[in-house]
Amino acid sequence: MSWEQLQSAVRRRVQSEKKPAGRLSIIGAMAKFSVIGGVVLAGILIPTTTFVAVTASDLGEDIVAMPMELQETQNPQTTRLLASNGDLIAYFYEENRQDVPLKDIAPIMQDALLSIEDSRFYEHGALDLRGTLRALVNNASEGQTQGGSSITQQLIKLSLVQQATTKEQRIAATETSVARKIRELKLAIDYEEKHSKKEILERYFNIAYFGDGAYGINAAAYHYFSVSPKKLSPVQAATLAGLVRNPLDFDPTIYPERALQRRNTVLATMARDGSITTKEAQKLQAEPLRLKQTEFPNGCVTSVAAFSCDYIQRYLLQDKALGDTEAARKERLKRGGLTIKSNIDLGMQKAINTAVKDNVEATDQAIGSMALVEPGTGKVRGVAQSRPMGTDKKDGQSFLNFSVPQKYGDSGGFQAGSTFKLFTVAAALKKGIPINKTYNAPANMTLPSGTYFDCEGGGTGEWKVSNSTVSGTMNMTRGLRQSVNTYFAQLERDAGLCNTVRTAESMGITVPFDPDKHITDQVGPFTLGVTSVSPLDMAAAYAVPASGGMYCEPQPVASIEDSAGKVIKEYKPKCERVLSTEIAAQINGILRGLQEPGGFGYSNGLQLNIQSAAKTGTTQQNKSVWYTGYTPEMSAAAMIAGADKDGRPIPLAGNTVNGRVVGFSEAAGSSLAGPMWKDAMGVIQDYLTPATFQAPPPPPVIIRPRSDNDDDDNRDDNAARGNADNQGNQRDQGDGDNPDDE
C-alpha cells in the first residue's frame, strides 16, 4: 500500500470512527488529527488555517522531512566461548540474543503471538486501520495509550530504539506522540513494500524483548523453558507471546500470577482465532506456568574457568582480527554473535581449580596459581588461582589475574627463584659448555664487579652469593638438580650473562632493561630468578625442553567464527626452535632426576606414574615458591606467593597458608608449591599418554694427563656424572633452593 493509497483509506476509516463525547474532547481530538492531516488527511478533517498558531504545522514539516527507509542492521547477538571439547565456558553479550529463522520457530508460537498482537497480520498492510485509528481517536480524546500498532509498526519502533545511539534518539524513538506514530507508519509502509510478511515476522521474533534479559524468541524459549523455539508447546507459546506487550509487568519470574493471567488471555485469543479449540484452551488455562529456567550468565565471573575466560577475553581485545581499535573489538565481542573455540581443557581446568583451592585459601595473605601449556603447540589448557573472581576483598575475591602476564591480567608477577637456572643451563649448553663441566662450588662466594656484562657491554656490581643445599665440586647435573647457587654463579659467568638473558627471552621471558631509567634485571643474580614472571610464562618456558627445543607462543584460542559460522581467524601454532633436540634432551635428563628416587620431588611424593621432570624455585625473603614440572605432553607451573589483599608481594614465612603458619624453612618449592602441582598433575596425567622423553646423548669424555692425586678426583668426577640413583646417595635432604636467592 502506497502513502497515497493510505491517505484515502485513512479518510474513509476516520469517517466511520465513533466520535468522542464532549466539546473539549472533540476539539482536542480534532487538533491531534490536524497533525496527521498535514501528512495524511490534508485538510479533510479541519481547515489548517484554523490552527495557524498551533505547532502542529511545524510538526508536520518535521514528519515530512523524516527518512522513508529504515537502516538495516544486524541484531546484537550473544557470543559463546567454548572449551576445547565444545562445552560452554561463558557468554559475552550486550543483549542475550541468538537469531533463528522462522522455520525454526514452532507454528503454534507464531499463532500465539499473532493472535494477541496482530491477528490480521497476513491480511492488512503496514497499518491495521481498525486497530490503529481506534487507538488514535481514543488516545487523542482521553489522554490514554491504547495499543493498535501492527507487527510491522512494532518492529519499526523496536528497530529505532535498538539503533538509537544518543539520549535524544532514544527519547524520539519511545515518546508517546502522534509524530512518532506517523514516522513509524511511514517507515513501516516502506518496509512492507520491500519485505515479505514472513521476513517481517522472523525479524520481529528475533528483535522482541521477552523480559528478564531474554532478547528474541530463542533466548526466551531457552531461558524460561529450556527448550528450543521449535519445540515450544501451546501453553509455553502462550506464556511467551503474552510477554512482548509488557515484559516487565508480566515477568513470570517476578509476577507469576500476572503472567498466568496474561497467558490465559492469550490462550483465549488463540481459541478465538482457531489456533486451538475452546476445549483445549480451557484445559491449558488450568495448568501452572511450569517454568524450567536456563540462565545465561554474562561474562566470566560465574564460569568454571573464570580466569581462563578472563585471559581469553583480554587476549581477544588485543587481536586486530576483531577490529582496528579496542573499542571496535569489544563491540564485536559483545554484539557479534561469535563462536570462540578455545584451547581450554575443562577436565584439566577443574584439576587445577581444585589444586589451588585445596592448598591456598581465598582469604590467605598468599596466592596459589597454576598454568598449563601444551609443549609443541603452545595451547593453553587452563589457568587458575586461589582467589576467586569478584569485588569482595573480605572474601578474598579479586579481578587481578595472577596466572598470566601483566598485559592480560594486571598483576606484575612474582620472582621465580631458581627455576631460572634452566636458562643458564640452556645458554651454557648452546655455547658448548659440556654437561659434565665441573666447578668447585663453595658455600659462599663473592663475584667482583666486572664479572658479568649486560647486553650493552656494561659491567655489573659485586655479587655475594651463598648456598643453602650442598657445596663442593660438582658437574652441571648435580648443580642443577640440587640447585647449587655458587655453581650457577660460575656457570652464568662462563656462559655469559647476555647469552643467558637472550636465552630466557627466546623462551618467552620478558627481561626488564632500560639503563637510562636505571631499570635492569641483567645482573649477576639473574640466574637465581630476580625477574618477575607469571605462571603462564614459566609453563611456556619449561614446555621448550619438553617439546624437544621448540618455544611456542601461549595460545588460549583455537578459532573464531562469526554468527553465520564463517571462520574469522584460525590460530596456528607460533613456534620457533630455540634449542637443539640434543640440548633439550640433556636438560630433560637432568630435570627428570628431581622426579625419580633421590630427587627432591620424589622425596616429597611428587612423582607421577608417567615420565616427568621438574625444577623448584624459592626467592629471597621467601616471597614466592615455585614448582615447575612437565611431561612430554604437558607443562605445568605451580606458584604460591605471599600477597596482600591488593596483590602486592609479601613474605610467606610467618603467614598462614591453608590453615597453618609457614615457617622460614617450610617456604620452599618442593614442600609448599610441589604438593599443589602434584594434586593437579596427579589427575591430569590420566588425560595424557605415557609418552617418553628422548634419551640424552652421552656426556663427552674428558681426557687429561694422570697424576698421583687422580684416584680421588676420578671418584668425585664419576659420582658427579653418575646416574640419578647414584646421585641420590650424595644429596642432603631438603629443598634444592636457597631462601637467600636474590
Image (spheres, rainbow, N blue to C red):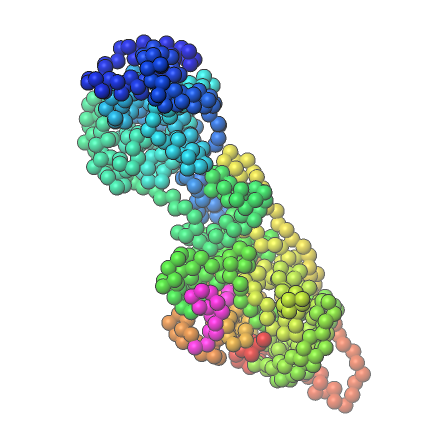
Q: Is residue 597 visible?
A: no
Region of the chain picked out in magenta, as a range: 635-654
- In the displayed structure, would residue 260 be above or below residue 643? above
Residue at 39% across, 30% down? 173
Asked whether 365 or 528 is in front, the reply is 365
Could you tell me residue 12's position as x and y percent? 32, 9
Looking at the rendered image, the quarter that the N terminus falls into is top left
Could you tell me residue 128's position as x and y percent? 33, 17
Q: Quadrant of residue 533?
A: bottom right
User: Residue at the front extreme?
Assistant: 53
Residue at 75% across, 74% down? 701
Could you tell me residue 555's position as x and y percent? 57, 52
How many discs appear? 0
User: Residue at the bottom extreme?
Assistant: 708
Q: Is residue 380 magenta?
A: no
- In the displayed structure, would residue 302 be above or below residue 514? above
Residue at 47% across, 39% down? 335
Q: Quadrant of residue 705?
A: bottom right
User: Residue at the right extreme?
Assistant: 705
